Structure formats: C-alpha cells, structure tokens
Amino acid sequence: MILKTFRWPMGITALGLAAAAVFWGWEAFGVVLILSILEISLSFDNAVVNAGVLKKMNAYWQKIFLTVGVLIAVFGMRLVFPVLIVAITAKVNPVEAVKLALNDPSRYESLVTDAHPAIAAFGGMFLLMIFLDFILEDRDIKWLAWLERPLAKLGKVDMLSVCVALIALLVVSQTFAAHAHTSSGHAADKSSTVLLAGVAGLITYLIVGGLSGHFENTLEEEEEREEEEEAKARAAGRTVSAVGLAGKAAFFMFLYLEVLDASFSFDGVIGAFAITNHIFWMALGLGIGAMYIRSLTVYLVRQGTLDDYVYLEHGAHYAIGALAVILLVTIQHEINEVITGLVGVVLIGASFWSSVRRNKKLEAEGGDGGEGPHESEEHAGARA
C-alpha cells in the first residue's frame, strides 16, 4: 500500500537528488534534501485537512484535485511563484529573471541579495501571522502546555496577533532594516522598504485567510443542504446514494482546497528563501515535498487515519515561527542555510517523538479504563 501510493514521489526524489548532485554538487544535494523535508514537515497538517475534505468528494473530483491540483501545486506555486517573487522585488522581467538564473548566476544572486530585505520582511510577516494565529488559539490538545495555556488566554484579546506582528515589524524596520546587508557588502538603510513589504505580507495573509474562511463557510452551508436533502429522501422512503459530494458542493470544496494548498505552499516557498536563494534548488526541493504531500493525502484518505500523531501540527507551526524570526533577522545578519533548515527538522522530530510517547501513554491508560479522551489528551499534552 505504502509503496504503491508513494512510488512516484520516491522515483522523483531519486531523480531530483541525483540531478542536484550532478549539476550543482553536494551542497545542492543537501539543500534540496533539507527543502524537501521542510516542505513535507510544514505541509503535513495541510495533508490532514485535504484528506478530511477530499474523502467527502466523489471519485471524479478526487481525480481533479490529484491531477489539476498537482500541476498547480508543483509547477505553479513551487516553480513560477518564486520566479515572480524575485522579478517583483528585484524589478526585472520574469523571463529575464530566469535567464539570469541560467546564464549569469552571480548577477542573479546579486539581485536576490539586494531584494532580500523586502522578501524577508514580506515572508517573515506572513509566516509570523500563521504562527501567532495558531499559538494564540485555545486548543483541546496542547504540546507545550506550560507555554500554550497562557498564550491561549491572551489570544482571547481581539486582533492580538495583528498587533504583535505590527509591533515586531516596527522594531525590525528600525533596527535590522537600518543596517541591511547588500550585494556590495556595505550596509544600507532599508527601513521604508522593509516596512512596506511587511505590511504587504500582513495584508496578503489576511486576504488568504479571508478567502479560506469564505470557502469554508460556503462548504458548511452546502453540507447542511446536502444533509437536509438526504433526510427528506429517507423520510420519503427513497434510497440515499452513498457516493461523495458532486456538483456545486464538490466545486466549492475544490476551490477551498486550492486556496488552502496555496496558503500552505506560500509559507513553504517563503520559508525556502531563508534557506537558499537558488531558484532551481528551491523549485526542485519544494516540488519533491509537494509530491509527497499529495501522495500522503491519498494515503490518509485510503487508510482513514488522520490524527495518529497529534503534535506534528504543533511542531510544524513552531517551525514556521522559527523561520519567521530567522527571516527577519537575516535582513541584517547572515545565517547558515543548513542551520536554518535543521531548526525546522529538529522541531518536527521532537513533536513526532512526543506524539509517539503520547500514544503509548494513552494505550497504557486505556487498559485501565481511566480518563476520557479529552482529559487524556490534555493530560498527555501537559506532560509531553
């Protein structure tokens, strides 16, 4: 089952890593591998959400999501989008950006370095908002309960995440941005650029979140309508079809999934800039990760198990928060790419190990017929 589901990602991984080593050397091999792992880690919760929605759709719309959706995810968001980021921030034509990456990598790197403060501010704010909205929300399951409980209480204050993010942006624009590093090696004042780019990142996050909320509300309305029609059919003695949702409901589900996937792939692309500025290493690593996420979605749907490792979502969001801080710091200070990538891997690994320990503890407690499910989860989270 696993080999059948993941055969394409495994094959592409082997080819991609081999191509990176042959064309660019072992450094590229390592960066592509780290980007692949990071993309999988950051998007694991996306796969869980996708699987939860995808299982309600009929076979046709599942096929659409796993074919058209893959093209959008791999080639659109992981290949085209990074080029557009460089083109916009460096103020060059997208075609010219690709030509520079192919024919004049030193010039391309110089443009990316000069544009880095804007990229870092934009991406740092976007990632910071994702982390803040997660950590300030009260959840039944807590990984680091000693930290998450008080933050959840603070999160009851309206718009707190936006306020915290704007304060962080003001501080960064007046400190790191005042001495931003450039390709020439001399510091430059990029305060206004960083402030503008950071506000743009915040606005982008709010727009993406608003679209996701809109589609989610539409989905809930459509599901309620479907349930009412099924109830009427049963009352009238008609047979209720067991097929998944189709038509308008499935279309809205497809749109909702694409918006969600775009938002998660966006933080992956932005986070990748904290690891490397090489556009092709980035596209290769993120593309490999995206293939695994799509296959993981299929696997979760077929297996029917979506939440065996409940702390992975926490670990992914802590990794997002770490990347946000790193991006903002790199406006002035350079941080080794390998260290940056390993921070996320370590956090994901820790959350995975905590999940395994939690499952073992719950199995032991279940044998004694102890606490209820929510109490057990909270208790395990507090001890992890």
Image (spheres, rainbow, N blue to C red):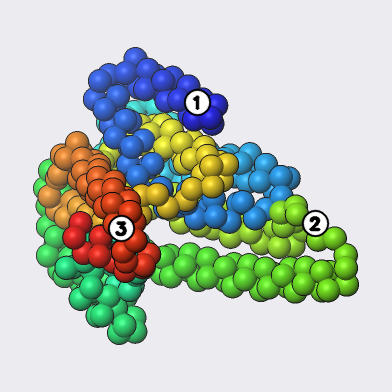
Horizontal side, residue 335 vs residue 363: left or right: left
The location of residue 107, given as percent across then percent down, is 30, 34
Between the residue at mark 2 and the residue at mark 1, the CA separation in whole angstroms equals 32 Å
**Separation (CA) of disc 3 from disc 1:** 37 Å
Quarter of the image for residue 168 reads bottom left
Q: Is residue 46 above or below residue 66?
A: below
Q: Nearer the viewer, residue 290 or 366?
A: 366
Return the residue nearer the eye: 282 or 64: 64
Query: Foreground mark, 3 or 1?
Result: 3
Residue with the mark numbered 3: 368
The reply, left or right, for residue 255 in relation to residue 371 is: right
**Residue assigned mark 1:** 3
Answer whether residue 344 is visible to the viewer in this image.
no
Residue furthest top in the image:
22
In this view, the residue in front, 143 or 266, is 143
Which tag is nearer the camera, tag 2 or tag 1? Answer: 2
Question: Which residue was labeled with disc 2?
Answer: 241
Q: Position of residue 351 (x, y in %)?
A: 26, 50
